[in-house]
Image: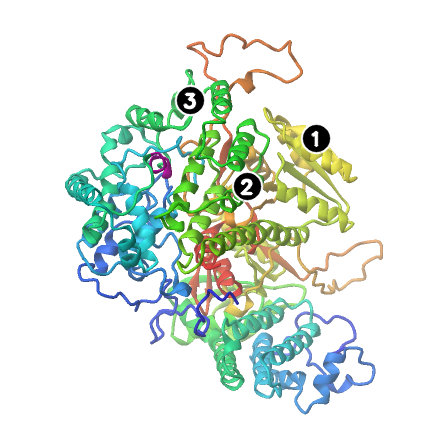
Amino acid sequence: MVVYGHAQPTTPWSPATGSLRPRLQSAVIPDDSTDTTVATVVGKPFSVIDEFNSWRKQPELAEAVAAIRALAAVIRNCEATTMMELEIELKKASDSLKSGDTTSISLTAGCDLFMRYVTRTSALEYEDFDSAKSRLIERAEKFGEISCKARRIIAMLSQDFIFDGCTILVHGFSRVVFEVLKTAAQSKKLFRVFCTEGRPDRSGLRLSNELAKLDVPVKLLIDSAVAYTMDEVDMVFVGADGVVESGGIINMMGTFQIALVAHSMNKPVYVAAESYKFARLYPLDQKDMVPALCPIDFGVPIPSKVEVETSARDYTPPQYLTLLFTDLGVLTPSVVSDELIQLYL
Amino acid sequence: MDPRRAPRTVSDPKVRKVGFFTDPPDRSLPGPPNHPISSFPTSPPSTVDNSPPSAGNSLSPVMIPPPRHSSSILSPLRRDPPEFFPLPASPTASTTFSDDVASTMKGRGVAAASSSLPGGLLFDIAASSVPASGLTTVSVVNNLPIGIFEKGGGVAVEMQDDQSSRSKSLKEKTTKAERRALQEAQRAAKATAKAEDGKTPAAASGAAASVKSGKSVKPPPSQKNDSAALAALEKKAGDRPPEKDRKKEVPQPRMQFDDKSRVEKAKRRAVVKQTEARNRVELFRHLPQYERGTQRTELQSKFFELDPVHPAVYKVGLQYLYGDICGSNARCIAMLQAFQEAIKDYSTPSEKTLARDLTAKIGSYLSFLIECRPLSISMGNAIRFLKNRIAKLPLTLSELEAKATLRSDIDRFINEKIILADKVIVKHAVTKISDGDVLLTYGSPSAVEMVLLHAHELGKQFRVVVVDSRPKLEGQLLLHRLVGKGINCTYTHVNAISYIMHEVTRVFLGASSVLSNGTVYSKVGTACVAMVAHAFRVPVLVCCEAYKFHERVQLDSLCSNELGDPDVISKIHGREDINFLDGSTNSENLQLLNLIYDATPSDYISMIITDYGMVPPTSVPVIVRDYRREHLWI
């Protein structure tokens, strides 16, 4: 089993900037490994985990993008001689990456989408292996590039929606949203940002720090003050952990609440998400997802009889979202399923 | 890989591109823009594009033209199978009465040489001539000049097979036939001129007014147009099946029954004489309704006279009439198996091609089945598939091989699109059932039953609420089967739905069809259940195989529906003392209405579970687009 820095499931967001999780440590693997697939990967000079880690050393690189790049490297360094073998290796590598963190939707979705995109071919079997492999590498590179550039594209697309004098409400620290705001600030737009505190991991505080460095007027709110200030807000900007097939999003706990309030007060809710986050999930309600727990520190000891709701994320149905900004363009929520069907079928 | 499929070139998956990339947006229109159009002088793509192909939506009550792509129309079907376009996009003028097709046909008909285009179009006409709606009229309604349509259709198939000249020479008839062809050509040419004037499409929406305004002119001219084009092109007699077959071949889709003249014509050509019900609800006058008693006796008495109808088909027809087979899957499978039998016993008459004649025969069987009970949408899709397969048979096959191919195609259709699709649906749906759930279902949908049984086998702990309604009380059958397997069930009628809904965690519904705007068309009462569930914020999941999807759009339950026997409403089985309505059924003040279907708007549906996976209702047009393309390739 691939072992991470901590023994138990880690907090979803670690304080380190740029990396969401402690790095995969491939060195610990060998002896007690029951997972033979990983052992074979490690035994070879090339290891997908190593590749993944090296990509993740880059700050600001999203986890899923690092995984995509690692998988592209797998194809390049693969020693298979037939298509099936290549696909099997790819699948093994993808599984090992995914097993590292089963609660991360974007990682799983990114890997799956990569697999579908790259191996989706009707007649690859007919070509000779080398040309097919080079074609795969080409596609993998292209996909990797798109994913890398995704944030910039999204930032460019959303500039039209931020006008001078507007007030933006932001929830949680999403690097995409931060990029959007940064680009807007750099193009000298005048706007102010309301930042929710984002308990339990206080990501809102970090975001407000970063924004303050950019000289953007920021106001911090506690999570309960959202409805109170919603009148002054012009639009809500959130990121997403994953975009599900119905067009809804799975994001940090509190997003659903904010979306509900915004919807009832007729404020638009914009979601900035890269396209590799489109997942083939379809939650019907809040409990219909893989749980992701996050310990909450209340500052005072809680008696053991008292239960604490520790879920770290919630599901926002598509009817509360106005638009999705993705690298594929500015989309309405119903297009997500369209894209997924195109890709998966 | 299917040997019939041409090897496809590898193409990279398309990525939707944002406007400011230098490349033109990759999300291209379905179909290659650079299609070999061969010598086709007079068909500017613009004409083709402009013709609002309401023709494409054969049965849309409101003829909303789908977006047309220039390439799609010009595709010679046989040349590039992989690039075959989705049926809606291709000018399948299954409403051959559509003016637009008529005008485009006219435009194209002038060109002599290239047979591909009109052939392609007409092939579609022939192939999709059977209406998918449950509303088609009693046989025929072939207000056609003798043989025009059939010839047109037949010629289309031949041309489409690219051996038109060869088969035509076979059919080079006596001078009498040639004279006839000339006559028809002249008549067609005359009708063409007439057709240009009337602009409203024939199978218009349910508005009685539009229908009434002299529409009998409409169908013949448009059909004449098509064949006029061909007649002009071919100048050959072409063989014509006997008049009886011709008349029964293409039932006009969605004939509006409030148009007296059309009804009269239809009746004259009907296989079975039926008397219309006397006391009909004004709002539903556009739907057919016949006296049930006379229908049955008529059919029974005609048993030995109905030679053109194969006994297997006859049996299925009777089963429909008596209500022995219920449920769209069962009906579809029964019909396809009957056709399999018919194909097995079929032998091509001399001087005819298998494809054309068989299509005509299938058409006649269909007319018969429609008389017994109007087709459901799933059956219409299956028929479209079958006709497509027949038309695509290579002419090099011997009769035995062709028949074997067709029968195996039907088997494959049933297996892939219905049986396997159900398995996939079950696999997806059980992931949405968790322990402690209370599931509600309405009526007796086959897909939902399979889901519940499978979930029970997997050991999930849940209980089921079966909601039922008169007059059919289908829920009782489902109840028996579920209780027999040991599932905890509750049974109630639909009038208690709001009482029971607060306990329910999920609602599973079946569908007869899902339309393009996400509307679910299923047994009457489903809309009620879905709306109450929505009000209680209970997720509604619809389980429906993809072959039941249709590109039609329907906004209400009125314009297209099916009327059942009104007498069953007034009586309650087992309670003879409730006979208050005896004797009032023919009263002026009382009209009994027994609707079979209703339309549930997409807002009340949370998810549709198909063999394509779990999709939101907004994705149905995507699947229809994909599905048409794919299913026509198998």
Image coordinates for residue B376, horizontal then vertical, percent: 48, 38
Q: Left of B83 or right of it: where is B118?
A: left
Instruction: Look at discs 3 and 1 and give the one toward the viewer.
Output: 3
- The tag earlier along the polypeptide, 3 or 2, is 3
Of the two numbered discs 1 and 2 in the rendering, the one whose residue sits closer to the viewer: 2
**Circles 1 and 2: CB atoms closer than 8 Å:** no
Q: Which residue is mark 3?
A: B274
The residue identified by callout 2 is B511
Q: Which residue of the protein is positioned furthest toward the right in this rendering?
A: A304
**Is residue A167 depicted above or below B437 in this figure?**
below
| Protein chain holding label 1 | B
Disc 3 vs disc 1: Cβ atoms closer than 8 Å? Answer: no
Labels 3 and 2 in the same subunit: yes
Q: Secondary structure at mark 1?
A: strand
Which residues, given as a range, are shown in magenta?
B244-249
In the figure, is residue A109 to the left or right of B143? right
> Depth check: B571 or B264 in front?
B264
Whether residue B120 is visible, yes or no, is: no
Q: Nearer the viewer, residue B624 or B556?
A: B624
Figure check: B213 above or below A135: above
